[in-house]
Each structure stands twice: as C-alpha cells, then as structure tokens.
Image (cartoon, helix red, strand yellow):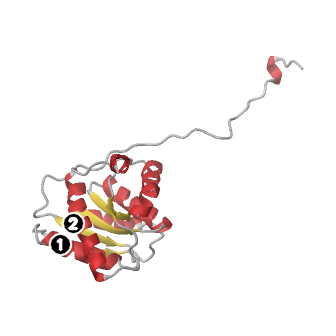
Amino acid sequence: MLMNDAEKVAVFDPRGALRFEDAPVSARKKGLAGLRLGILDNSKWNANKLLRGAVAALGEEIGFAEVNYYVKHSFSKDAAPELIERIAAENDIVLTAIGDCGSCCSACVRDSIALERLGLPSAVIITTEFARETELTRQAIGMKTLEPVVIAHPVSSITADEIAQRVAQIKEQAQQVWLGTKAPMALRVALQ
C-alpha cells in the first residue's frame, strides 16, 4: 500500500543511542607531602581496617598536613552532596573504600567521581572481582580515566596478614593515582 506525504509515519529505534560524557579527572598532584588527606569510609566490613592501615603505611613516607576521617552510613548509596562538599573543602586528596560487591563498588566510584569533579584527586579502592563493574560505572557516569586502586578479593573475611598485604597494594597504587602515574586499568587487564 502506498502512502502519500500526509500519511507518513515516524519510526523510532527502541534501542536508543548511547552517548557518554568523558570528563577529565582533576589535576594530579606534583607531590604529596604537606597535603590534607581525606579518608571516606563507606562503613563496609574491614574498610576501616584497610583505610587506617593505609594511612599508617603512607604516613611512614609522606608527611601529610592533616588526615581527616569521614564515614557514610550506607555503603550502597552515594555520599550525601553536603558530605562531598565538606570533604572537598577540607582536603587536597582523598582515599575511599571499599568496593567489594555490586552496590558498594558503584557507590564508591560515584563518590570518587563527584570529588574529582570538585578538584580532588581521589583514590577509590575496589577488589579484583569488581574491576569490570568499575569500568562500566566510570563510563556511565562520565569519567573513563578515573583510575581505581585494585586490591585482591575478598575483603570481608580476611586475616590480619591478608589485611597487611592489601594495605601494601593500597599504599603503592594510591600514590600513583594521586600523582597520575598509574597505568590505565584496561591496559593492565589486557597485559595480565
């Protein structure tokens, strides 16, 4: 059946089109001594042990001007905008943990992206099992170049020795994130 111009029908593709923003991360630091370090604990099991251990290990080499601790009380939700703004106002760099399951991983990554957009280099700690989710969250939120600190999985049921091993991973990688010397996550995965 032929239609005239008045009878034309618009057809829409139900798949839509994917468009991703790709905002850059904040400017990386030239050095870490004398900076104010913000610690954002998402209240997951062992997050506090990892974060406090990392602060102690980092403090052996870096003289931070101050270390400020913050806790969000729901690991599966983003930090409140007021908390993000407070952290940004009171610190120069941030370390946050832990992304070791679905909702907590994506929430930690979103918190880091929010802080990056306010000018703070942010090292978000995730586990190996959630690298792919982190990659997808970075892309969906619009900051594909945000580099996470990737530690061994699991975290919730580990011994003191295993915590120490993960703290060593955090110590090395967090500094690389803040200084901008960390190899991109996709490249590391491809090389393994």
Residue in the foreground of this view, choosing between 27 and 168:
168
Quote the CA–CA distance across marks 1 and 2.
6 Å
Percent coordinates x, y for residue 68 in the rendering: 23, 73
Residue shown at 43%/43% (left/top)?
21
Instruction: Please tell me whether mark 2 sits on a helix, a strand or a loop.
Output: helix
Q: Residue furthest right?
A: 1
Residue shown at 32%/78% (left/top)?
48
Q: Which residue is mark 1?
A: 57
Image: 6 above or below 89: above
Image check: 100 left or right of 6?
left
Percent coordinates x, y for residue 27 in the rendering: 23, 49
- Callout 1 amino acid: Ala
Image check: 115 left or right of 66?
right
Given contact means CB atoms under 8 Å apart, are the residues at marks 1 and 2 in contact?
Answer: yes
Q: Quadrant of residue 175?
A: bottom left
Alpha-carbon neighbours of circle 2 within 10 Å: few (<14), some, or many (≥20)?
Answer: many
Residue in the foreground of this view, choosing between 190 and 37:
190
Percent coordinates x, y for residue 64 in the rendering: 13, 68
- Answer whether residue 92 is visible to the viewer in this image: no
Checking the image for residue 171, the label placed there is: 2
Percent coordinates x, y for residue 88 in the rendering: 28, 62
Image check: 148 left or right of 61?
right
- Callout 2 amino acid: Lys
Quarter of the picture containing the N terminus is top right
Residue in the foreground of this view, choosing between 128 and 21:
128
